[in-house]
Image (cartoon, rainbow, N blue to C red):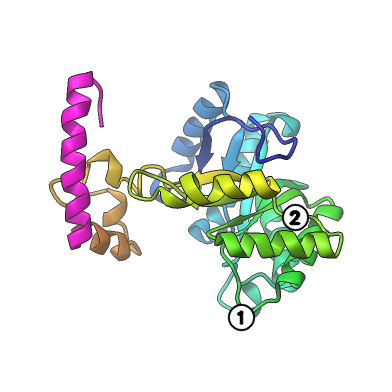
Amino acid sequence: RNLGKSGLRVSCLGLGTWVTFGGQITDEMAEQLMTLAYDNGINLFDTAEVYAAGKAEVVLGNIIKKKGWRRSSLVITTKIFWGGKAETERGLSRKHIIEGLKASLERLQLEYVDVVFANRPDPNTPMEETVRAMTHVINQGMAMYWGTSRWSSMEIMEAYSVARQFNLIPPICEQAEYHMFQREKVEVQLPELFHKIGVGAMTWSPLACGIVSGQYDGGIPPYSRASLKGYQWLKDKILSEEGRRQQAKLKELQAIAERLGCTL
């Protein structure tokens, strides 16, 4: 299908690399997963400069190089915002967008990415500066398109308006969290943006960080995402009152799954 109203054709499913590549799984397992995805028609592979402090991009790039897949057959996306500890190494300033994307391309061993995402809004940078910087990296051949992630509808509309006002390139899609406990943005807000300005949708965390799989029904199992170092926030979320309500809903869904003869 087309990504938004652009001409970029992407598979309905994509493979993300958050937590897994360069972290939770071995490089060999990452290669097996990516090969399985590619061999079954998936062409969209998503990463970010912040994933495993850049290691996810390194692993992804190494796999692409090793497999020898045609670059034109792949849609590679990365996200810019959290690049390093210094103030100049994060955010959506012109400086960090350009320097951050250059660093990502080096780790990926690629000349360009298909889509570069602004990995959250930056209230400290004028919208015009961000849109101009994204237009610049596209004009320089470092990216084909740009998009947003975790942006509100108002922020996306502002970026679109700035692009139209100054003859710049607008974003083509928003990458939003979407699962059974997080539905409004993708099902209500983004369709309106699609019809108004052509912004499409990519989604992240379809299993709600594994919560929807039902694996946390009896607590936090070892080797699960919530048991990992640095993911105390997820553990707290699962063990919270809201987390218990979600587990109760999943038990109802489990009964339906059993009647259908399938897993949750």
Q: Is residue 16 above or below residue 41?
A: below
Is label 2 or label 1 in front?
2
In the image, what residue type sits under mark 2? Pro
Image quadrant containing the N terminus? top right
Q: Which residues are magenta?
A: 239-264
- Residue 184 percent across, percent down from the top left: 43, 50
Image coordinates for residue 152, horizontal then vertical, percent: 55, 62
Residue 245 in the magenta stretch? The answer is yes
Name which residue lies at 65% across and 38% down: 3
Q: Which residue is mark 2?
A: 170
Q: Which residue is mark 1?
A: 87
Residue farthest top in this picture: 261
Residue sitting at the far left:
218
Split into 4 quadrants, where in the image is the C terminus? top left
Task: Tell me if I can see residue 78 in this picture.
Answer: yes
Q: Nearer the viewer, residue 136 or 252?
A: 252
Q: Is 142 drawn above or below residue 39 in the view shown?
A: below
Amino acid marked by disc 1: Glu
Instruction: State which tag comes first along the sequence, 2 or 1.
Output: 1
For this view, does 117 lie left or right of residue 21? right
